[in-house]
Amino acid sequence: MSDIPKADELFKSIDYNPPTTGWMETPVDFSPGHWCYPAKPEKIEYMDSKLPGLWGPAREWLPSNDDWKLPPNWKEIVVNGFRERLKKFRTLQVYMDICVRCGACADKCHYFIGSGDPKNMPVLRAELMRSVYRGEFTLAGKILGNLTGSRVMEEDVLKEWFIYFYQCTQCRRCSLYCPYGIDTAEMTMMARELMHLVGLNTNWIMEPVANCNITGNHLGIQPHAFKDIVDFMVDDIEEVTGRKVKAPLNEHGHEILFITPSGDVFADPGIYTFMGYLLLFDYLDLDYTLSTYASEGGNFGSFTNNEVMKKLNAKMYAEAERLGCKWILGGECGHMWRVVHQYMDTMNGENQWSGMTTPKSPITGTVFETSAATKMLHITEFTSDLIKHNKLKLDPSRNDHLRVTFHDSCNPARGMGLLEEPRYVLKHVCNNYFEMPEGTTREQTFCCAGGAGLNTDEIMEIRLRGGLPRGNALRYVQEKHGVNLMACICAIDRATLIPLADYWAPGVGISGVHELVANALVLEEGEVRTMDMRQEPLPGFEDEDDDWTPPNMEDA
Amino acid sequence: MTFDTVLAEQKARLAKGWAELILRTYPKETQKVWTRQRDRFQNPVGAAILEATGDLMNLVIDWKDAKEIAASLDRLIRIRAVQDFSPSQAIGFVFLLKKLIRDEFFKAMEKDGTLADLLRFEARIDNLALMSFDIYTKSRDEVFRLRVEEVKRSQSNLLKRAGMILDVTADQSAD
Ligand code: SF4
Ligand code: SF4
């Protein structure tokens, strides 16, 4: 019973005056629900055996306990690591120095907008790090301390980092509004790197990292099981379309390697998008293969540190070389494209094998010069080019039961500027398309609040409040236009937007873009479909299966 | 003039006062930003507070439409149920209306001997609190349901493969 507050405590809690302490002194709540579960020790041991020296001690620990079992010299490790990175990453040094605290970013973060917690204002989130920078590395900070908003690295400060740098999805919305272009997401990345050095980590990130390193996908599925699952989907596609599609896996000598997030292979509703790819490629008779070793397009390493991000990313070129593919077609994924677009060429450009060429559509002949550096093409660029050249026979009326809006996932939108292609595709495969209000889409899109490794159920409240701005805009088009489906081009979104929509705009479903492409794709002249990719009856065919009466209801 | 009429005449001002009190349940820095930002898409919490208090003032004075009242309460409670509040803090905003009304009218009504009217009105606020309790509990249940469903969904294809999900449809079922 000790968890139930006593009457006088309750009485006090009905005092509505918020804390009057300054934000820096306001204590942090470490009770469950405020943090993601720490990584299992065996995951850390495994990663430490592969990339030693980056992970701190492997151990059982819990943020709700006082003792986080940090290594004795943790402070030295963090401060030295900070110093090293200030030298190594010029941006970090600049971002530490140039913020003028103008506050333009203050109300731009979805976590602040939804929670009202000032430490979720990007400027204050960054200040968690900047205050230490001043306290440890600048003369004024060292002498004047608190007067300049400086503090030295103490355990409380580190613990606060753990809470707040895991309440940043690295979405970069704040940086869009900063007159100096300060990118708080990059600071979050650095803070997380430093925390990893002393063993502060989360299982939802580290388990996929370890699994991706072992088997190539985030659940650690081995190749034979992966094949079984893909075969299931091939059967389901046949059930819907009557067509038995090819699903080449680990085959040598094809022109294209197709890589997509493994979430689309395992998780509802991503699987329907995956089926969409298979159907489209079969229809085109595309010369491609999937790889089980590079079966995770998403890069969970990018949520930890540069080294793992690079290692996991390298797998894409390694598989292209092993299988002899000339270029890589990438599926609907968020952070995969952030990594490809912003880091891949620098990190692994030299690992491209000599046979790689700039992506060229074998169907239309279009050469995608914008992908010349990485040799990786986004599926919506590929498909919109097909549509533009009239290479797909489409019947958008098959999606007439859907009233669709599009959620710009942060990474493709802000990380690579992919704004038009998915819309172009959607408008050709559905008749009912509606935009959410200005200021909530395109570059200014609101995050799903589940990116950067936060898509785990133990912080559902944090995700839901962070998802409020997106949910609120969605609710608006639901009420105004009857929208009942939000499409997106990111596997994490396809997972995390479901509870978000259920909570803030109940009745709106979530899908990928290529699920809708598959619905609309006319495989041959006169093809009639009775159900969509989810095996739900299409309008006009609702009654087909409905002549069954539950046994005990016959007389009713 | 009935107390309802008095309230109706001042409802805009009262709703605003109530909204301000609710806003004060958030930290100072936040209050500043949320008072300034008027765009309902950029500041959904601020907008929900303003709109819900406005609607509720009308509805409580009318005291006819329980469904509408629940819908308005739901707008705010759904938000506060996932913010960092204890349950009592999350729904305590209802009692801020009581506080406001007492601050505004108690002394004068005591003098005129019309306190009974005030108490009658307060009974409505107590009712709001009870409804809020139900709505809060429903919202929390929803959060837990979302957690469970998410875990199931994230591995749906694996469960299928392991034969742990049975896809029974009418034509395959024995009866
Ligand atoms: S990057 Fe996104 S989540 Fe992080 S502080 Fe900026 S707006 Fe918030
Ligand atoms: S907008 Fe840029 S300069 Fe202004 S407070 Fe935010 S990070 Fe600092």
Image (cartoon, coloured by chain):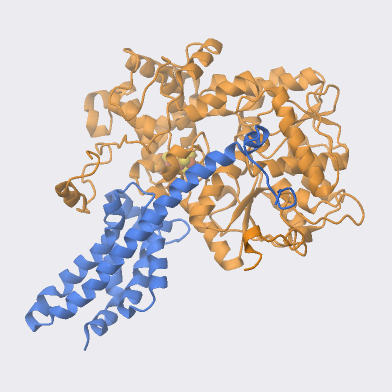
Tell me if residue A79 comes above or below residue A103 in the rendering. Answer: above
Colour assignment, chain A? orange
Outermost residue, left direction?
Answer: B111
Tell me if residue A542 comes above or below residue B167 in the rendering. Answer: below
Residue A77 is drawn in which quadrant?
Answer: top left
Q: Position of residue A171 (x, y in %)?
A: 52, 40
Q: Return the residue nearer the eye: A252 or B34.
A: A252
Q: Return the residue nearer the eye: A203 or A128.
A: A203
Which chain is blue in the rendering?
B
Q: Return the residue nearer the eye: A271 or A436.
A: A271
Q: Position of residue A525 (x, y in %)?
A: 92, 54
> Which residue shows up at 38% across the image and 37% down it?
A125
Q: Quadrant of ligand 2?
A: top left
Q: Position of residue A82 (x, y in %)?
A: 41, 20
Q: Is residue B116 left or right of residue B54?
A: left
Outermost residue, right direction?
Answer: A525
Residue B49 is drawn in which quadrant?
Answer: bottom left
Tell me if residue A169 comes above or below residue A252 in the rendering. Answer: below
